Amino acid sequence: MDLKKVYEENEALLTGHFKLSSGKHSPNYLQSAKVLENPKVAEMLLAEVAKQIKEYGLKIDKVCSPAIGGLIAGYELARQLGVNFIFAERVNGKMTIRRGFEVKKGEKILICEDIITTGGSALEAAAEVEKLGGEIVGFAAIANRGLCKRVGSNFEAKSECKLPENLPFFAIDDFIFETYEVENCPMCAEGSEAIKPGSRGN
Ligand code: ZN
């Protein structure tokens, strides 16, 4: 599957001048909500992730996603794996599992995001699952931003990656974009102003 092409066709790979949540600037931004807007595309993408997980032979009892970004990807992945889906959400900034969701002792849980950059939110959701007695067996996302090592890729994990090295991480492909510190940003140097994705209708 040409993941980049799927993102482009669905206007989910933005080009411009973006301020990322890390504070760095980038000429590209992935708007995964757009690629998941069409349920048929979501089904196709997560089928690829489900296939990798099945081929790996990972046993999963439940999928858990950090809200909001991971919800659609995680739900569709759970549907295709034939397991239940729960989610963690931020309450006053802290990741929490609520809404009556239960995790049984020893239940094998896969954490699913839309995109994994450093894996910070995924790891926070994993910590909540573990507090309830669940066992984290792996991580999944549609795309990897190239900081973490995914199953089937030759790229080594970068120091920024927060995912544990001993657990498998499944994603369809790597999206590696240029990022710049504000001081070194060539787009800032040209006088353009970085946009925070999500604001101004992005
Ligand atoms: Zn800039």
Image (tube, rainbow, N blue to C red):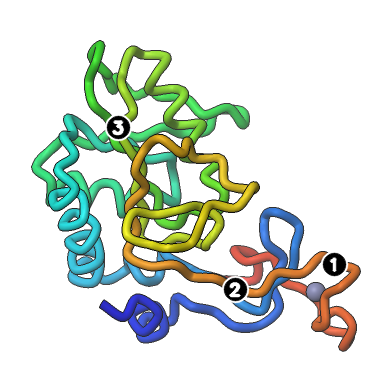
Q: Viewer-nearest of labels 3 and 1?
A: 3
Residue 6: x and y, percent? Answer: 33, 80
Front in this rendered view, residue 161 or 101: 161
Asked whether mark 1 and ligand 1 are closer than 8 Å, the reply comes as yes
Residue lying at 70% horizontally and 54% vertically, measured from the top left: 22
Mark nearer the N terminus (3 vs 2): 3
Q: Which residue is mark 2?
A: 177
Kind of residue at disc 3: Val
Question: What's the residue type where badge 2 is placed?
Answer: Phe
> In the drawing, what numbered circle is on residue 182?
1
Q: At label 1, which amino acid type do we have?
A: Val
Instruction: Find the distance from the CA under tag 3 to the CA under tag 2.
Output: 29 Å
Q: Quadrant of residue 37?
A: bottom left
- Give the residue at the far left of this rendering: 82
Mark 2, Cα crowd under 10 Å, few <14 / some 14-19 / many 20+, is few
Quadrant in which the C terminus is drawn: bottom right
Q: What percent of the width, then of the height, locates residue 168?
A: 34, 43
**Quadrant where the image shows the N terminus:** bottom left
Q: CA distance from mark 3 to mark 1?
A: 37 Å
Tell me residue 11's x, y (percent). Answer: 43, 81
Q: Does 162 sit above or below residue 27?
A: above
Q: Against 84, is 96 above or below?
A: above
Q: Is residue 135 above or below residue 84?
A: above
Res. 137 mark: 3
**Circle 3 crowding by C-alpha within 10 Å: few under 14, some 14–19, many from 20:** some
Residue at coordinates 20% horizontally, 49% vertically from top-left? 53
Question: In terms of secondary structure, where does tag 2 sit?
Answer: loop
Specify whether 21 is left or right of 165: right
